[in-house]
Amino acid sequence: MSLIHIRQPERTANAKRLGAQLPNDYEELYVKADQTIRALAAPYPKVLRVYEALSADPRVRANWEMANYLAIAKLNYNDHGPIHARVTASYLAQIMALLIEAKAPFDVVESGAGDIEDAFAVGMAGILLHDIGNSMSRSSHEILGVMMAREVLERILPPLYPDPEKLQLIENFILSCVQCHDMNPPPVYLEGGIVAVADGCDMSKGRARMPFDLGKIDIHAVSALSIEEVDIIRGGSLPVEIHVEMSNSAGIFQVEEILVKKLVATPLKAYVTVMANVVTPGKHDRRIINSVILKDGRLRPM
């Protein structure tokens, strides 16, 4: 099967309308994310087909673009469009790969709905579609996303799941991921927890640059601009470690509010830890803290 070429992020439509451009480092992360997803999905044909089908679907792309317009132009939020979708998908793929290696009990498998490949496909579809409800409204965007995602899934899933019963089970798992990604309600399935945490990993300063350039100055914006890099690595005592590099200790607010709050309320908390470090100190740096680690559900100084 030939691979579908997925177009580069559009600096044109939304960026021009908004009077701002996405930073180069965020676009570079977008390209790197595609490479990461393809490498980790290579052993799982269904996962790759789900990724390519959704990424190439013009109606999905339209929803991503409209979600971005609403989030950035109307609400001064950060990126919720095609770059965010792909970057979070790369985080999900990395977490999935480490959990598969650790033989984590995926609910798709435990319930009998499918195998490891199906669990990965559920997560991939869930993360790519998680924010499309923002194209209609930020309020209740989770349930709106479920309604919109159902139509998409009923177009792309039947070739992968010809058995109607299995198709329905896989679709239900994906829709649960979409509904629970913003912790309203918190996910009960491991796959939903991975989607929520992968979403929370997209904290880097590039994502926050556009609303900041458009005039948003608050603790959320400043904290986000302190996040230099987020890496998913193999952990020590737990299978997965999320490593966050910050240029300023203000970034701890972002780590706590965006990432840790999600992690500790999901089934993923048993498999993941978080470590955050301040890097590149300035000449007059008076940081309050250098490094923190997630322990017993709270960030604590190292």
Image: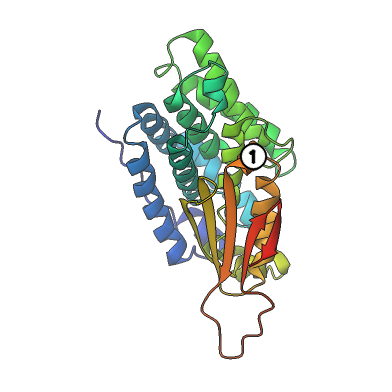
Q: Is residue 236 left or right of residue 197?
A: left
**Nearer the observer, 213 or 95:** 95
Q: Is residue 273 left or right of residue 93?
A: right
Helix, strand or loop at disc 1?
Answer: loop
Residue drawn at x 63%, y 67% as measured from the top left: 302
Q: Position of residue 132 (x, y in %)?
A: 59, 39
Looking at this view, is 79 or 171 the one in front?
171
Relative to 208, residue 198 above or below:
above
Q: Is residue 297 above or below residue 22?
A: above
Q: Looking at the picture, how far across and down is residue 249, in whole percent?
A: 65, 73
Q: Name the residue under label 1.
A: 181
Query: In which image quadrant can residue 275 be found?
Result: bottom right
In-image side of 52 versus 197 (left or right): left
Residue projecting furthest to the left:
2
Q: Compared to 94, does 156 lie above or below?
A: above
User: Residue 287: percent from the left, percent from the top?
Assistant: 66, 80
